Image (cartoon, helix red, strand yellow):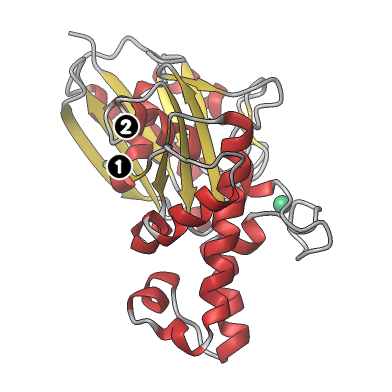
């Protein structure tokens, strides 16, 4: 029986998973990235991890690598990454040589959307917009269980659509990007500026600390609503599934959803906005599925 191998290459940990044709876990391993040790050490650890997993079952489909950041699909390199030593390195070709299997690389938001569409909370839907709202703000578009990448490979990059043309500066070079307002990083920076104290978004919401600065929450909800309404107006997906740390913010499914409904070009929004099912595992499952759902 053919198994599938996926690897989630993150800034702090590398996770590998071997799943069978029924998507059941055959073996799973997690190791630290130790990014300070550099490219050669990291790639050596990925190769060791892959070979250890392959010992648990035959793999004859391409191996999927899921990683945050922009990927140059033609070259098989990372154009940007928070693991700086990986940028522009021949990750794909080095891994293919070492483990003698084709490698497919995909960003974490696309892997998340794919996994949730096949195994997770969005599996009943045809056109899925899978959001990762955490440190940053990304998404993937999956149509009929296939990732839609687009000719520029930027499909789903809604974090960098502009909400405010004269707004906050974004690292991408534009001003007023959605990510500069509704990512965890942006919201926590805004909170620290208001209060002088750092708190994570879930704590601010859960403890109702925002009651001292209600504008913080009101802006968060209305920006979330506007940003997703723009997506629905253009793409009108069958479902939106939320992932990342901020997917645990329950008011996004109530007040947040209402704000989306208020802002879309329709009097009646029927689009489900749902929480992910696979949690942090979505990336590695999505990576393992890349060979079958390309
Ligand atoms: Zn931007």
Residue 126 visible in this rendered orientation of the protein:
yes
The image quadrant of residue 77 is top right
Q: Residue at x 61, y 25 (%)?
A: 76
Residue at the extreme front of the image, as rendered:
267
Residue 107 visible in this rendered orientation of the protein:
no
Q: Nearer the viewer, residue 201 or 217?
A: 217
The image quadrant of residue 28 is top left
Instruction: Answer with left or right where residue 109 lies relative to residue 205.
Output: right
Residue 96 position, x and y percent, is: 48, 19
- Residue located beneath label 1 in the image: 281
Q: Nearer the viewer, residue 97 or 128?
A: 128
Residue contact between numbered discs 2 and 1, judged by CB atoms under 8 Å:
yes
Instruction: Answer with left or right where residue 288 lies relative to residue 26.
Output: right
The kind of secondary structure element at disc 2 is helix
Instruction: Answer with left or right where residue 239 lies relative to residue 3.
Output: right
Disc 2: CA contacts within 10 A as few (<14), some (14-19) or many (>=20): many
Disc 2/disc 1 C-alpha distance (Å): 6 Å
- Residue located beneath label 2 in the image: 285
Q: Residue at x 41, y 46 (%)?
A: 242
Residue 276 position, x and y percent, is: 32, 44
85 in relation to 142, above or below? below
Residue at the extreme right of the image, as rendered:
166
The kind of secondary structure element at disc 1 is helix
Q: Residue at x 56, y 90 (%)?
A: 195
């Amino acid at each position: 029986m053919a198994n599938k191998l996926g690897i989630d290459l993150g800034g702090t940990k590398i996770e590998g998973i071997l799943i069978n044709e029924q998507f059941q876990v055959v073996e799973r391993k997690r190791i630290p990235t130790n990014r300070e040790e550099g490219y050669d050490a990291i790639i050596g650890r990925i190769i060791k991890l892959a070979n250890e997993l392959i010992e648990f079952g035959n793999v004859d489909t391409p191996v999927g690598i899921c990683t945050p950041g922009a990927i140059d699909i033609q070259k098989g390199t990372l154009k940007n990454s928070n693991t700086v030593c990986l940028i522009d390195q021949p990750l794909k070709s080095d891994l293919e040589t070492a483990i003698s299997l084709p490698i497919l690389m995909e960003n974490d938001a696309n892997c998340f959307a794919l996994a949730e569409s096949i195994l997770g909370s969005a599996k009943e839907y045809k056109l899925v917009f899978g959001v990762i709202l955490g440190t940053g703000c990304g998404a993937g578009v999956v149509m009929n269980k296939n990732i839609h990448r687009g000719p520029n490979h930027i499909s789903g990059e809604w974090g960098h659509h502009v909400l405010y043309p004269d707004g906050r500066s974004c690292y991408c070079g534009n001003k007023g990007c959605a990510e500069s307002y509704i990512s965890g990083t942006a919201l926590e920076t805004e909170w620290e500026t208001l209060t002088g104290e750092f708190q994570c978004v879930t704590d601010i919401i859960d403890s109702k600390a925002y009651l001292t600065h209600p504008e913080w929450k009101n802006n968060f909800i209305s920006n979330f609503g506007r940003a997703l309404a723009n997506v629905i107006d253009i793409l009108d997906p069958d479902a939106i599934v939320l992932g990342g740390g901020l997917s645990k913010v329950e008011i996004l499914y109530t007040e947040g959803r209402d704000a989306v409904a208020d802002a879309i070009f329709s009097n009646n929004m029927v689009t489900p906005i749902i929480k992910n099912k696979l949690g942090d595992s979505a990336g590695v499952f999505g990576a393992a599925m890349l060979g079958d759902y390309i």
